[in-house]
Image (cartoon, grey):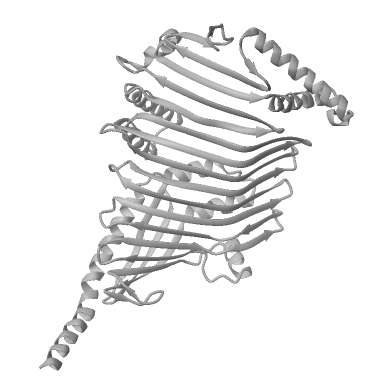
Amino acid sequence: MKNKKILGFLAIFLLILVVAPYFIGNKAKALLEKQAIQISELPGYKLEIRTYDQGWFSSHAEVFYGFDEHTLNILEASIDKKYSFDKSTYKLLKNGFIVDVTVAHGPITFQNGVNFALLTLAGRLQDMDYADFNDTMTKNNLDSMFDLFTSVSYGGTTTIKATVPAFKENDPKIEIGVIFSGMELQATLNAQQDEFGIFFNFPGLEILSPNGDLSLHGITGQATGTKMNDFLWLGKGNFSLGHFKIENSTDGLTLSLNNFSNDYDLSKESDTTLTMRLQSKAGSFVANEDGQDVELADITLDFTLNHLNSEAITDYIKSIKQSYQLTEQTQEQTTANLQAIAARIGEKLLKDSPEMIVTDLGFLMGGGFLKSEAKLSIDGDGLENIQQLSDPIALNKRLVLQVNIKFDKAIANAMTAIGLKKQMAAGGADLASMPKAQRDQMINLQTSTALQTFINQGYLTQEGEIYSLHFDMKNGQRLVNGKPLAIPGM
């Protein structure tokens, strides 16, 4: 009797394994078609299922991914048709990309191992009729330039993993070299499609050319989000960049940024408003032009935007999306449409009296420091028409601004040195050629003179080596360090 029960359960299990894939195949096709429509609704992009051959245990599809007509028109207008590289790149983007997709029907699949899932999907980029692309594939011994694996759990959660392999390219015709270190993306989307999580890792990219080089290293990012409506997602995330450098040999300019990170958090403040916080940090930023360096360290920016009308932000996203899809508009019509959108959204936003609070903006330079904080708000109570703010007096009465700045003598010396270098270079002299003692004396004298002038005028207060400025603007009145002063240009 016991053996009969076991055999009965086994028979039912095998029946499920045989019959279920057919019905899951129908669900898989409907799911792909739905997601294709959703992606195609994003401004700028187009995704469509070109072919779909449905089988019992698996299905095969060819999926096209590329840019929409409006985006292609913009790209075509921006290329320089004198250069074959521009023309061939545009041709590649215009033709788009075809991904070969194999869908395995659950409840058990065997793609990338054994998966207990409703379905799994594996895709890879199809070969293209593009000589440079195929040459890169051959030289780097690559089977595919893009691989995708997706699984949908029994509960409906979708998990996605996409990878682009590392490769090198050196084109002697245009003297450009590319070193790409690969990229990986992972994402999840719940069954209701109203919550997501995403992570990406981009180890690095280098572009080498006779006119200059570009390098990016250590790029990662992650985010989570919750759908608020059809146009707006709330959530938080972070982005980090280990190193960025660009060198332009033509004008002798070099820029570099190290250990940059950015965190954001967009959430509900009330039933009708949102709040967003942004925190950015950088270990260092260096700009060098013709041998003259400007170096900042420990850069921080931390600010919050409050009282953001959620209806206005939703309206803005929706309107921009609709405007983008109007491909028959002239440039003048597009500009007029965007101006109308900005005016309408601006009125909605200002009526909730938005504010920006900068809790920390600072950096180190030349052995000195600068720290600041600020608060800017606008009183939208009773504002009937945004055109009212075109009157400077009316605008000043609604604006409230508070700024606090502190810095030391060392950073003031560093800024003076930059000004002196440029001033002397314009006259054909080099500040660095002067004896150090003489140079330091000149810089210190000019700095002390300028600082004392600002102190005498009431723009600065001094406590030892620390200088401060407090600025207030409210009800049309402007105060610097508590004293009403006329500010040039305001």
Q: Could you say which is closer to the camera, residue 377 or residue 320?
A: 377
List x then y, in percent, for residue 473: 47, 13
Give left or right: position of 291 versus 232. right
Total tally of numbered discs in the picture: 0
List x then y, in percent, for residue 210: 74, 49
Quadrant in which the N terminus is drawn: bottom left
List x then y, in percent, for residue 153: 29, 66
Q: In which quarter of the image is residue 269?
A: top left
Q: Residue at x 45, y 55 (%)?
A: 199
Q: In this view, does 191 lie above or below 296?
A: below
Q: Could you say which is closer to the camera, residue 427 or residue 23?
A: 427
Q: In which quarter of the image is residue 8?
A: bottom left
Q: In which quarter of the image is residue 282?
A: top right
Quadrant in which the C terminus is drawn: top right
| Outermost residue to the front | 464
Q: Which residue is drawn at 28% across and 56% down?
A: 34
Q: Which residue is drawn at 52% across and 26% down?
A: 373
List x then y, in percent, for residue 117: 30, 70
Q: Is residue 223 above or below residue 102?
A: above
Q: In this view, does 444 lie above or below 9?
A: above
